[in-house]
Image: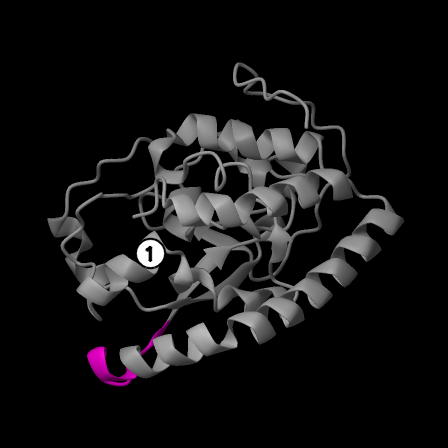
Amino acid sequence: MKTLNLTQSNTNYSNRHCRPHRRSFVVSPRGRSVPAVDASRNVIVRRGNESFLYQAAKRAFDLAGAVVLLALLSPIMLVTWAVLMVTTKGRPIFAQERVGLCGRRFRMFKFRSMVVDATRLQEQVVNEASGPVFKNRRDPRITRVGRFLRSTSIDEMPQLFNVLLGQMALVGPRPPVPAEVAKYEPWQLQRLGVKPGLTCLWQVSGRCEIGFEDWVRMDLWYLRNQNLLTDLKLLWKTPMSVLSRRGAY
């Protein structure tokens, strides 16, 4: 894997534009809906490795990998589902709107790790993260069971269904929420130029210990170096990263 250059914050808009999607909108800081894809201003372009062979191989690998992982992880997922059915009073799955490839919105699935009304309570919690993301190491909204699920990444397992649906890939930048995208600087929007994924360079490099700008630069590194070998290397490093629990909260 090539060395990551964290000093590069801008890349050329040389790839073809993504076509605007009718439902691709983000909410501006003032509450006004604005297009997430604006080809006329070169805000988001489709980037990464666009060769047909790579895209076909990546999709086939995503499908096969998601099926195999669901089969292997199904006992853990079933036990987690049963426990959460009791502790969340029948609401074990949290479906949250996220922004994917070229600004297209989709519902991302997670095992519920916070109290049911966590979104409403967010304004009462201090944000410890830099940039537009929201993170708090001791977020009081996280339940006892949820803290374990997060530290072991079990809460992310339902996203394998997002992979099967074609909304995510096994490897790719983590999908942000619309409110975060609304605060992005123009160069940061480039991370939306490829399909989001379950794991990425940020995921295996310390996760929440990494500042937002370095996180984005890691995603842009992936865009410039996207190929099957890079994907396989990141997948290989993921289990050890999960077991270390570094930056997982």
Q: Report if residue 220 is visible in the image.
A: yes
Relative image position of residue 174 (x, y in whole percent): 50, 47
Relative image position of residue 49 (x, y in whole percent): 77, 40
- Quarter placement of the N terminus: top right
Residue type indicated by callout 1: Arg
Task: Give the image quarter of residue 4.
Answer: top right
Q: Dot 1: few (<14), some (14–19), or many (≥20) neighbours within 10 Å? A: many
Query: Going by the picture, which residue comes out furthest to the right?
Result: 53
Residue drawn at (22%, 36%), measured in percent from left and top? Answer: 128
Q: Disc 1 designates what residue?
A: 150
- Residue 87 among those drawn in magenta: yes
Query: Secondary structure under badge 1?
Result: helix
Residue drawn at (50%, 50%), measured in percent from left and top? Answer: 175
Decide if residue 174 is on the left or right side of residue 94: right
Decide if residue 18 is on the left or right side of residue 53: left
Residue drawn at (42%, 49%), measured in percent from left and top? Answer: 243
Relative image position of residue 133 (x, y in whole percent): 34, 41
Question: How many marks overall?
Answer: 1
Colouring scheme applied when the structure was drawn: one colour
Relative image position of residue 125 (x, y in whole percent): 14, 48
Does residue 211 sit above or below 78 in this rendering? above
Query: Going by the picture, which residue comes out furthest to the left?
Result: 124
Does residue 11 sit above or below 40 in this rendering? above
Q: Report if residue 132 is visible in the image.
A: no
Task: Give the image quarter of residue 113.
Answer: bottom left
- Residue 162 among those drawn in magenta: no
Q: What segment carries the magenta color?
A: 85-93
Decide if residue 10 is on the left or right side of residue 91: right
Residue drawn at (19%, 53%), measured in percent from left and top? Answer: 122
